[in-house]
């Protein structure tokens, strides 16, 4: 029987004392360690360098000396206490006192996501600050807490997608102990943890990977420059690094699911796609650990292969973000026509997104000026994560403005009802639950002044092209970061408390009624009337329960009477849902 995986690379303390160091580094001629000020030579073993230092232990600081000239952090560093350019720290992976031994994870169909940015979710901006809010999230009904990337990035303010030390939780957030404490606390509360990870590029500052080996290739290009080398000469070590990273989060941090960022910018034309290999290893390890764990992709491909099983020719990811649900609802409610939103805008698009999944499933896309996508009609609802907004859609699509500040309250209620009652896995972005109006914007804190200026100027060009006339917020400015914090004071207002009640009530109904929680897209029926601007969605369950959601998108109030005496409103409170914009009827 195979044994559970353990991290082989980086710095690993030994039970009898001392630390074993192993680095994949085919590029340098020599490699040495600087451990607490002592130079320790390393021995080459194939493409690896190895060394054992009997005087080192947990808490020792170390760095790597390449060719006797350049001192760099360890690419597999578990901890970067002084930032991306400085020393790595030895961490004992077995030292944390876990209390979640009975936790086995949640079925995917039970996931109700809450996406947050650790640095702006609370005034503390730490994992500990998030722990303090777990009772609030539990009361809201959240079952899965999703963290934007936490891998060490330059400075103290960043979305996390500029991470360069992919094994090291950011020090300012609380480092390894802080993240493990958060995971442990969530599991005690019955909440799963989802971590956003980035394998399509590495941030520009503190990125020393190419000095160690053939990490990048110019055979393909990404929005961030050269692509990660997954299929060229020397790519075996790169693939192993990434595969072991997902196993690391699963094993050492007890993470329940990983959200893989922008997999459309991962290029691999080998016979065994990196995502398929990664998924197979991940699920093998989860089975050995006796846990349910999931891989969720962010994909701009509308390609059903992403989430089809390998036996059916797919890559075998468990689920993916369903961007087109957002696009259809946002474009219809805001009437926005810029960029890709101009390819949507009809109620029929919302209906198709609800019942089939991909709207562009092989039909012509005006935005892309070609036929695009494949059909997802036969794929299960639990394989799609839907949202009204997320970090990208607020900051990029809507110039930092949230939906609550773009549409009327009646339309906001309709959107919320569609989200929570959909046959998919709903995701809220922090602040959604009480209709926060203060925005969320892109922010950085690069230490390299030339890079900082380039980021600012690049962002200005993007705004000029996509958001002409919108107020520009400099990513490097502290004010941009501060104005992206969750505005907890807003939650006390009457309007905001009403939306919070609505979310809580709808989530409670979703959990209670199988017809709302079964993720049966095949048992979802939608009727639309473009002229009357109404949508009726009926959902059912084999056990007999049935739900009917009636939505009015028009400008005038429409009485929402019971359409069928056999249906009744739920006896559970439904907030402001049973009103002039939407009504939910349920039957046992």
Image (cartoon, rainbow, N blue to C red):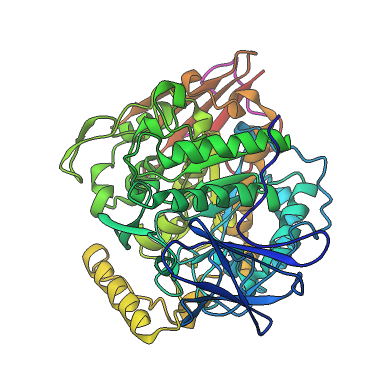
Say above or below: 406 vs 518.
Answer: below
The N terminus sits in image quarter? top right
Number of marks: 0
| Magenta stretch bounds | 559-570
Q: Quadrant of residue 377?
A: top left
On-image quarter of the C terminus? top right
Q: Is residue 85 left or right of residue 287?
A: left
Question: Of residues 490 and 121, which is closer to you in this image?
Answer: 121
The quarter of the picture where residue 123 lies is bottom right
Q: Residue 236: image x %, image y %?
A: 44, 48
In the depicted view, which residue is nearer to us: 153 or 7? Answer: 7
On the image, the x and y values in percent for residue 178 come to: 72, 65
**Where is residue 220 shown, x and y percent of the image?**
26, 53
> In the rendered view, would you say 52 is above or below 434?
below
**39 or 402: which is nearer to us?**
39
From the viewer's perspective, is 188 left or right of 569?
right
Residue 335 highlighted magenta (yes or no): no
- Asked whether 564 falls inside the magenta stretch, the response is yes
Q: Is residue 525 above or below residue 36?
A: above
**Which of the 4 image quadrants contains residue 33?**
bottom right
User: 155 and 206: which one is in front?
Assistant: 206
Q: Is residue 534 visible?
A: no
């Amino acid at each position: 029987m195979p044994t559970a995986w353990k991290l082989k690379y980086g710095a690993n303390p030994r039970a009898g004392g001392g630390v074993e160091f192993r680095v994949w580094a085919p590029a340098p001629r020599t490699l040495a360690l600087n451990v607490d000020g002592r130079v320790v030579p390393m021995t080459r073993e194939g493409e690896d360098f190895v060394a054992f230092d009997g005087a080192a232990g947990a808490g020792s600081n170390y760095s790597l000396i390449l060719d006797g000239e350049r001192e760099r952090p360890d690419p597999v560093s578990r901890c970067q206490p002084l930032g991306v350019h400085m020393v790595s720290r030895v961490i004992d992976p077995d030292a944390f006192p876990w209390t979640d031994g009975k936790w086995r994870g949640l079925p995917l169909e039970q996931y109700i996501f809450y996406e947050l940015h650790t640095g702006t979710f609370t005034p503390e901006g730490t994992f500990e600050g998030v722990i303090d809010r777990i009772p609030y999230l539990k009361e809201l009904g959240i079952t899965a807490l999703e963290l934007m990337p936490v891998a060490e990035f330059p400075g103290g303010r960043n979305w996390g997608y500029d991470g360069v030390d992919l094994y090291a939780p950011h020090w300012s957030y609380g480092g390894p102990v802080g993240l493990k404490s958060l995971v442990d606390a969530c599991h005690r509360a019955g909440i799963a943890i989802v971590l956003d990870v980035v394998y399509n590029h590495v941030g520009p500052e503190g990125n020393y990977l190419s000095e160690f080996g053939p990490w990048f290739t110019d055979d393909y290009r990404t929005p961030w420059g050269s692509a990660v080398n997954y299929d060229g000469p020397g790519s075996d070590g790169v693939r192993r690094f990434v595969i072991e990273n997902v196993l690391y989060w699963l094993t050492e941090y007890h993470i329940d699911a990983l959200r893989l960022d922008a997999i459309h910018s991962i290029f691999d034309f080998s016979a065994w796609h990196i995502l398929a290999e990664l998924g197979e290893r991940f699920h093998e390890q989860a089975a050995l650990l006796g846990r349910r764990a999931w891989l969720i992709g962010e994909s701009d491909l509308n390609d059903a292969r992403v989430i089809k099983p390998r036996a059916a020719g797919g890559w075998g990811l468990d689920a993916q973000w369903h961007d087109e649900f957002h696009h259809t609802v946002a474009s219809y409610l805001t009437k926005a026509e810029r960029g890709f939103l101009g390819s949507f805008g009809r109620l029929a698009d919302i209906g198709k997104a609800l019942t089939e999944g991909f709207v562009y499933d092989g039909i012509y896309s005006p935005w892309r000026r070609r036929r695009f996508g494949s059909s997802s009609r036969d794929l299960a609802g639990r394989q799609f994560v839907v949202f009204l907004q997320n970090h990208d859609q607020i900051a990029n699509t809507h110039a930092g403005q949230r939906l609550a500040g773009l549409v009327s309250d009646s339309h906001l209620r309709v959107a919320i009802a569609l989200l929570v009652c959909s046959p998919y896995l709903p995701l809220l972005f922090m602040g959604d639950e009480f209709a926060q109006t203060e925005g969320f914007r892109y922010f950085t804190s690069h230490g390299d002044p030339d890079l900082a200026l380039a980021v600012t100027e690049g962002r200005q060009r993007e705004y000029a092209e996509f958001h002409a006339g919108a107020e520009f917020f400099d990513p490097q400015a502290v004010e941009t970061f501060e104005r992206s914090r969750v505005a907890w004071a807003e939650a006390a207002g009457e309007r905001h408390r009403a939306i919070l009640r609505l979310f809580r009530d709808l989530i409670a109904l979703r959990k209670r009624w199988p017809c709302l929680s079964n993720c049966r897209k095949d048992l979802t029926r939608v009727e639309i009337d473009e002229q009357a601007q109404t949508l009726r969605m009926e959902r059912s369950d084999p056990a007999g329960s049935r739900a009917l959601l009636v939505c009015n998108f028009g400008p005038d109030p429409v009485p929402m009477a019971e359409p069928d005496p056999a249906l009744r409103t739920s006896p559970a409170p439904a907030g402001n849902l049973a009103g002039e914009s939407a009504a939910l009827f349920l039957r046992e």
